[in-house]
C-alpha cells in the first residue's frame, strides 16, 4: 500500500496508526523505512524513522539500482530500498510505503496492483495551520511546503483512493476499510 500526501496532512501518523490496528488483529505489517539525505530531526532515529545517508551514498545506491523508487523533495533526496521492500513483501501481509507522488508513480510501474491512497488535508488553510503548530519548520520552510503542497495536490487523482484527513479517527477507519476491501477481493 502506498500512502502519499503533502507534508503536514497526517500521512505518517495515519500509516503508523493503521499498522498498529492491523497488528492488533494479528496481521503482519511492515512499514517501509525510506533512505534520505536530510539530517535527522529531533527525536528521529536512524533505521527506525529513516536511513540517514549522505548524498554520495545515495547517488551510489541509485547507480546500483538499490531503490524501488527515489525522488527529490524539498531539496533532499528520498528513496525506498528495493531489497528490504521485496523481502518484507514475502514475509508480511501488508507493506506500507510512505512516499510522495513521484515515488508512487515509479512503484506503480513495477507493481500496478499496488493500492495507492492520497491523504488530503481538509483545506490549504488547515494544512498551513498544522505545519505552523507542529513547530518543526521556520517561516521560509513553511512557505516552501505550502507551495509544494499545491503541486502535490495536483497529482491526487493519480491515486486509487483519496481520503480527507479532517478527523483522524475517521480517516484511519477509511484506510482500514480500504485494506479490508482489498484483502477480501484478493481471496
Image: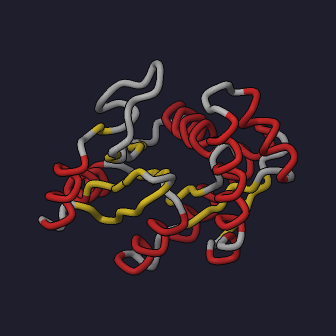
The answer to whether residue 157 is above or below residue 70 is below
Residue extending farthest front = 140
Q: How is the image coloured?
A: secondary structure
Which residue is found at the position 85% from the left and 43% from the top?
126
The answer to whether residue 124 is above or below residue 52 is below
Image coords of residue 71 (percent x, y)? 40, 63
Q: Quadrant of residue 30?
A: top left
Please indicate whether residue 180 sits to the left or right of residue 73 in the image: right
The answer to whether residue 149 is above or below residue 135 is below
Which residue is found at the position 40% from the left and 74% from the top?
106
Please indicate whether residue 37 sits to the left or right of residue 76 in the image: left
Image coords of residue 16 (percent x, y)? 54, 36
Q: How many marks?
A: 0
Residue 184 versus residue 38: which sits nearer the camera?
Answer: 38
Please indicate whether residue 34 sits to the left or right of residue 121 in the image: left
Please indicate whether residue 22 sits to the left or right of residue 145 in the image: left
Q: Quadrant of residue 62?
A: bottom left
Residue extending farthest top = 43
Image coords of residue 23 (percent x, y)? 49, 35
Residue 47 versus residue 86: which sits nearer the camera?
Answer: 47
Q: Quadrant of residue 184?
A: bottom right
Amino acid at each position: 500500500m502506498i500512502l502519499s500526501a503533502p507534508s503536514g496532512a497526517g500521512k505518517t501518523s495515519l500509516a503508523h496508526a493503521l499498522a498498529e490496528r492491523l497488528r492488533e488483529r494479528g496481521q503482519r505489517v511492515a512499514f517501509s523505512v525510506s533512505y534520505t539525505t536530510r539530517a535527522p530531526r529531533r527525536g528521529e532515529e536512524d533505521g527506525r524513522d529513516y536511513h540517514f545517508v549522505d548524498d554520495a551514498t545515495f547517488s551510489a545506491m541509485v547507480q546500483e539500482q538499490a531503490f524501488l523508487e527515489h525522488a527529490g523533495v524539498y531539496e533532499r533526496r528520498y528513496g525506498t530500498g528495493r531489497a528490504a521492500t521485496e523481502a518484507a513483501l514475502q514475509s508480511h501481509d501488508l507493506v506500507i510505503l510512505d512516499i510522495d507522488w513521484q515515488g508512487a508513480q515509479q512503484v506503480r510501474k513495477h507493481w500496478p496492483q499496488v493500492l495507492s491512497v492520497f491523504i488530503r488535508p481538509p483545506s490549504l488553510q488547515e494544512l498551513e495551520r498544522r505545519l505552523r503548530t507542529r513547530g518543526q519548520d521556520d517561516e521560509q520552510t513553511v512557505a516552501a511546503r505550502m507551495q509544494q503542497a499545491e503541486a502535490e495536490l495536483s497529482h491526487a487523482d493519480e491515486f486509487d483512493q483519496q481520503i480527507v484527513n479532517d478527523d483522524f479517527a475517521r480517516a484511519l477507519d477509511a484506510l482500514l476499510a480500504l485494506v479490508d476491501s482489498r484483502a477480501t477481493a484478493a481471496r
